[in-house]
Amino acid sequence: MGCRGRKVVTSFVAKVRKEYELIIANAENASGGLGLNAKNAWELKKAGIDILTSGNHIWKFKDIIKVLETEEWILRPLNYPLAPGRGFTFFSLPQGGEILVINLQGRTFMEAIDCPFLGVDRLLEELNFKGPVIVDFHAEATSEKVAMGYFLAGRVSGVLGTHTHVQTNDCRILDGFTAYISDVGMCGPVESVLGMEKGIIIERFLSKRPQKFDLAKGKAKVCGLSLTIDRLTGRCEDIAFCNWEEENDSC
């Protein structure tokens, strides 16, 4: 999230890049804590991230539109109607085979866009892809995320929730096939409220008056998951937390 998030992610990816065939990151708040601009998108791509997913804040910076329209490694939610860019992409794995990555957005407590359940159902039927499939489900309500996990259980390799910034302790494998977690968590300042200076957020709750949000400072951490997937069947064989905290504040 913001400068702190980009810095800690760049450091982490440099350490683990050789361990993984594919690294995916939801980057929609990488620019100033809200949204993603073209410069920061390319920065994260060059740092070694293979696929960038996003969510409801992807539309803040207009220069990201051209990147969405021309590059296959950056996604916007599939179920936005009449939107530039793409909601899914195929990635060729270095050790053979392909993986399908899909970006969805929930509707509960969020914009009333097209149905993510029907949208992903149609896409899977149309593509009829037999390899690994990872879904980033960017949603507010835990119930909607859990429902999506069960809806896609046995059909995709993983349903990974994003958007609510706090990593949940419910990662598991559904039906012996599909990795699931309600929220992968945030990459950004440890001493913060969802990446923002905690004093400002506390004041907002106390006074109920608008406050200018500022990104928090100090040490940052990476929250993520590590998945082991059978490239032929698409079945997730193992799911584990993949978190890392930097030793020093470098931003």
Image (cartoon, rainbow, N blue to C red):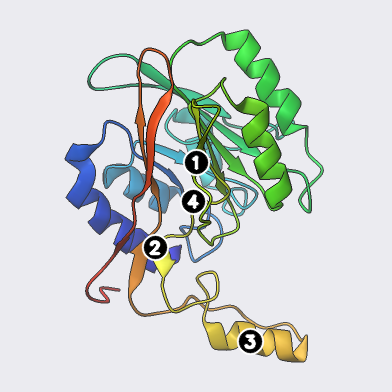
Judged from the image, the secondary structure of the residue bearing numbered disc 3 is helix
| Tag 2 residue | 5
Given the image, on which type of amino acid does mark 2 rest?
Gly
Q: Nearer the viewer, mark 4 or mark 3?
A: 4
Instruction: Identify the residue at horizontal 72%, vertical 90% (top origin).
Output: 206
The residues bearing labels 3 and 1 have C-alpha atoms spaced at a distance of 33 Å
Residue 228 percent location from the top left of the image: 34, 32
Q: Quadrant of the C terminus?
A: bottom left
Q: CA distance from mark 1 to mark 4?
A: 12 Å
* Residue 202: image tag: 3
Q: Is residue 100 above or below residue 142?
A: above
Q: Position of residue 182 (x, y in %)?
A: 58, 48
Q: Residue at label 4?
A: 184
- N-terminal label among 1 and 4: 1
Q: Is residue 104 visible?
A: yes
Q: Is residue 35 left or right of residue 119?
A: left
Inter-mark Cα distance, 2 to 3? 22 Å
